[in-house]
Image: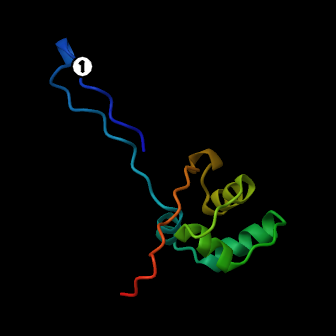
Amino acid sequence: MPKPTPIKSGRYAKQRPAVPIPMVTIATLRKAKGLTLQAICDHINEELGLKVDRGTISAIELGHRRASTQMLAAIAEALGIHPTDVDTAYEPRERRSGVVA
């Protein structure tokens, strides 16, 4: 996530610090567009000639699996966004250390 710019002195000293650009997860965008996992898979399989299933897309959305640049570009196209709009900073989910809740 981008860090806010430091506060400037002088004329702009009372300005608010810059706010980072809001990020939306792939799953949130997919759901907001009314698309199912199967619709994303169908688009990728038919239009792009790749072989992908719902489990793969779900694992990518949940952060359980990394995605190649090609796969992220395919998902972006299926969502109707430019591939450069996808942030590729991957932070793996933390695993629980044998604790059952």
Residue at (57% x, 73% y) in the render: 35
In the image, residue 77 above or below residue 57 = above
**Which quadrant of the structure image shows residue 52?**
bottom right
Q: Position of residue 97 (x, y in %)?
A: 45, 76
**Which quadrant of the structure image shows residue 2?**
top left
Q: Position of residue 96 (x, y in %)?
A: 44, 75
Residue at (60% x, 62% y) in the render: 79
Residue under label 1: 8
The image quadrant where one finds the C terminus is: bottom left
Amino acid under label 1? Lys
In the image, residue 98 above or below residue 14 = below
The image quadrant where one finds the N terminus is: top left
Camera-side residue: 101 or 48?
A: 101
Q: Position of residue 72 (x, y in %)?
A: 66, 57
Camera-side residue: 35 or 71?
A: 71
Q: What is the residue that sits farthest to the bottom in this orientation?
A: 100
